[in-house]
Image (cartoon, rainbow, N blue to C red):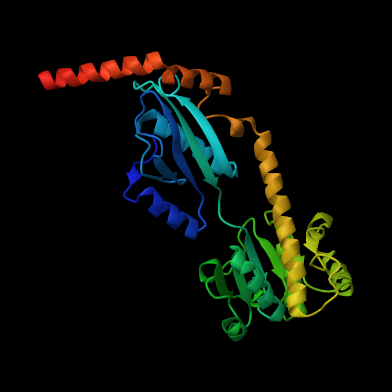
């Protein structure tokens, strides 16, 4: 049997604050109803990450099942609220034998990520719009002084990572292309030679969320002519140029940035919807806490049993007798 790691010293609310500040994947499990006997009462909470548990739902098989379920939801990219029904005797093999409902609130992996090449006026305007939305931004420029003097939105420092990078001077073995998988990428440097070298190196990667190049249709026609000798048709098709939603005629940096950010938000929404659809199509992603999960009808019947007057009276009698025995001893 696989056991979850032991709970850490952090309370659930401390771990929740840290996980949300770091944009790390996590799930908050809450016991919302209890019928009959259970390890902990309604309102008990536990914070679950891929590697640790914070606080406790009472230990035992119930806690293990909740942790397994939460991590499966995180791994599948699910988000939102998931209500689980558990009969502690039949499904969790716990002697207390009651029935609980556990609400699992899932906050999947990190926020969307953008690799932005170029710290000019348009790049700064894009960062000013996107960083406050919680995106992780890797901001790169070959000009150290330009990057150092570029405007950074106040309060967004944890989400903004700046570094100097020049693709024309890199050694592939020593300085690999610093773009994380699943990143959206925008190429808008001050130099067309850099632009071309970057998109040529990036278009071969199938693990990127999107790849956009700033420029006019005539710029893209020239680039396409040069790149098609080195890239396959499907690789060329990964490059968007021009970038930005259509219909915004202005050419000021802020106007260009609005169109570009709007397009990024659309692309990320479509990507997220595709991931969610794939998860829903996976039958293992839709399973309940264990393979014997209760149906809604069974859950209602079980709650009715535990809340029936004759059950409450018998439970009270057992409690009273136990108290008398302890007092007598």
Residue at 43% over, 17% down: 308
**Residue 63, position as x, y percentages in the image:** 40, 34
Residue at 84% over, 56% down: 233
Q: Quadrant of residue 151?
A: bottom right
Image quadrant occupied by the C terminus: top left
User: For the image shown, how many numbered marks are present on the structure?
Assistant: 0
Image quadrant occupied by the N terminus: top left
147 lies left or right of 213: left
Nearer the observer, 112 or 226: 112
Nearer the observer, 106 or 322: 322
48 lies left or right of 109: left
Residue at 80% over, 63% down: 240
Nearer the observer, 161 or 246: 246
Residue 118 is at least partly visible in this image = no
Nearer the observer, 262 or 240: 262
Residue at 38% over, 13% down: 310
The vertical placement of 24 against 299, above or below, is below
Q: Quadrant of residue 149?
A: bottom right
**Residue 216, position as x, y percentages in the image:** 85, 74
The vertical placement of 207 against 249, above or below, is above
Residue 202 is at least partly visible in this image = yes
**Residue 182, position as x, y percentages in the image:** 64, 55
């Amino acid at each position: 049997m696989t056991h979850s790691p032991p709970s850490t010293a952090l309370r659930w609310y401390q771990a929740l604050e840290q996980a949300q500040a770091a944009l790390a994947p996590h799930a908050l499990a809450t016991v919302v109803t209890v019928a009959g006997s259970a390890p902990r009462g309604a309102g008990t909470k536990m914070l679950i990450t891929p590697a640790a548990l914070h606080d406790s739902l009472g230990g035992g098989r119930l806690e293990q099942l909740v942790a397994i379920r939460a991590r499966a939801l995180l791994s599948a990219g699910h988000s939102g609220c998931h209500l689980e029904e558990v009969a502690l005797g039949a499904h969790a093999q716990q002697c207390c034998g009651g029935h609980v409902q556990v609400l699992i609130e899932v906050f999947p992996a990190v926020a969307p990520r953008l690799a932005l090449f170029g710290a000019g006026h348009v790049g700064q305007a894009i960062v000013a719009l996107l960083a406050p939305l919680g995106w992780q931004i890797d901001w790169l420029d070959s000009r150290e002084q330009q990057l150092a003097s570029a405007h950074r939105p106040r309060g967004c420092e944890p989400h903004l990572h700046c570094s100097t990078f020049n693709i024309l001077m890199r050694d592939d073995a020593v300085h690999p292309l610093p773009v994380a998988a699943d990143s959206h990428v925008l190429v808008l440097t001050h130099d067309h030679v850099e632009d071309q070298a970057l998109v040529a190196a990036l278009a071969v990667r199938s693990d990127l969320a999107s790849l956009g190049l700033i420029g006019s249709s005539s710029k893209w026609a020239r680039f396409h002519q040069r790149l098609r000798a080195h890239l396959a048709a499907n690789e060329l098709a990964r490059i968007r140029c021009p970038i930005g939603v259509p219909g915004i005629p202005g050419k000021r940096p802020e106007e260009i940035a609005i169109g570009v950010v709007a397009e990024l938000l659309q692309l990320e929404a479509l990507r997220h919807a595709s991931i969610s659809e794939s998860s829903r199509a996976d039958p293992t992603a839709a399973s309940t806490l264990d393979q014997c999960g209760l149906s809604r009808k069974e859950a209602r019947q079980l709650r009715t049993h535990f809340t029936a007057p004759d059950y409450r009276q018998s439970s009270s009698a057992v409690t009273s007798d136990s108290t008398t025995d302890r007092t007598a001893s």
